[in-house]
Amino acid sequence: MARNTGPVCRICRRLGDKLYLKGEKCFTPKCPFERRPYPPGQRSLRRRKVSDRGLQLREKQKGRAVYGVLERQFQRYYAEAARRHGITGDNLLKVLELRLDNVVYRLGFGQSRAQARQLVRDGHITVNGRKASTPSHVLKVNDGVGLTEKGQKTRFFESVREEIGGKEVPSWLKLDPANMTGQVVAEPVPEEVGAKFSTATIVEYYSR
């Protein structure tokens, strides 16, 4: 299958970095990366030297894993970022951050991007008052995000409503905890994202 359906913690171990793909579990001692911070599979005592090309590929794979996108999607996002004015790496990060599933995650409606993606697919999220079912939809400034009538009645969002009051959201988002709505008020700030991968290295990868 095109999308990974196995344990996502193996991705962190394979790429050699903690990417926080499981939400709250990643901050506990139960995190598999904390217990086994080495690549999955048979272990070798010999250290393999990674080429510059291999390092570039690893950063690109980290970006894909963090935002849960496929290779063709990632290529399209890079092409869009390259067409825009400004720094290509920063533009790429902005496009990825404005994905609907990521905005839902940043607002605190989901504990991880994977969970936020599922909430969108299950028909619980609206964009500008209309039900949205495409997690990859890229939002624009002034777009609003909320819950459908179906979503408002679920026990899951009842518990989220109780916890979301103290949620800190990025400066480019506005959260209304009482009404469980959010809005994109500006473009994402790359310095505020705290990316677990190097966008400059990804640009080098695609610029070969």
Image: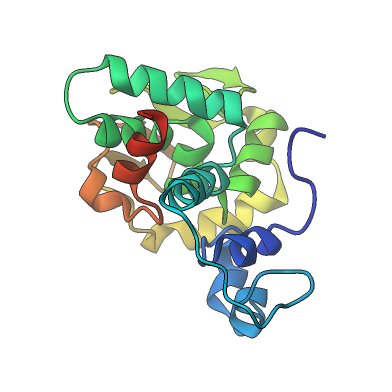
**109 or 85, which lies in front?**
85
Residue 117 on image: x %, y %: 62, 38
> In the image, is 196 to the left or to the right of 121?
left
Q: Where 132 sits versus 33, above or below?
A: above
Task: Give me the residue at 62% from left, 52% from top.
Answer: 158
Task: Give me the residue at 53% from left, 62% from top.
Answer: 20
> In the image, is 187 to the left or to the right of 61?
left
Q: Residue furthest right?
A: 1
> In the image, is 143 to the left or to the right of 25?
left
Residue 44 on image: x %, y %: 70, 78
**200 or 124, which lies in front?**
200
**74 or 21, which lies in front?**
74
> In the image, is 1 to the left or to the right of 9?
right
Residue 112 on image: x %, y %: 57, 53
Task: Give me the residue at 66% from left, 83% from top.
Answer: 45
On the image, which quarter does residue 132 sit in? top right
Q: Tell me the colour scheme of the image.
A: rainbow
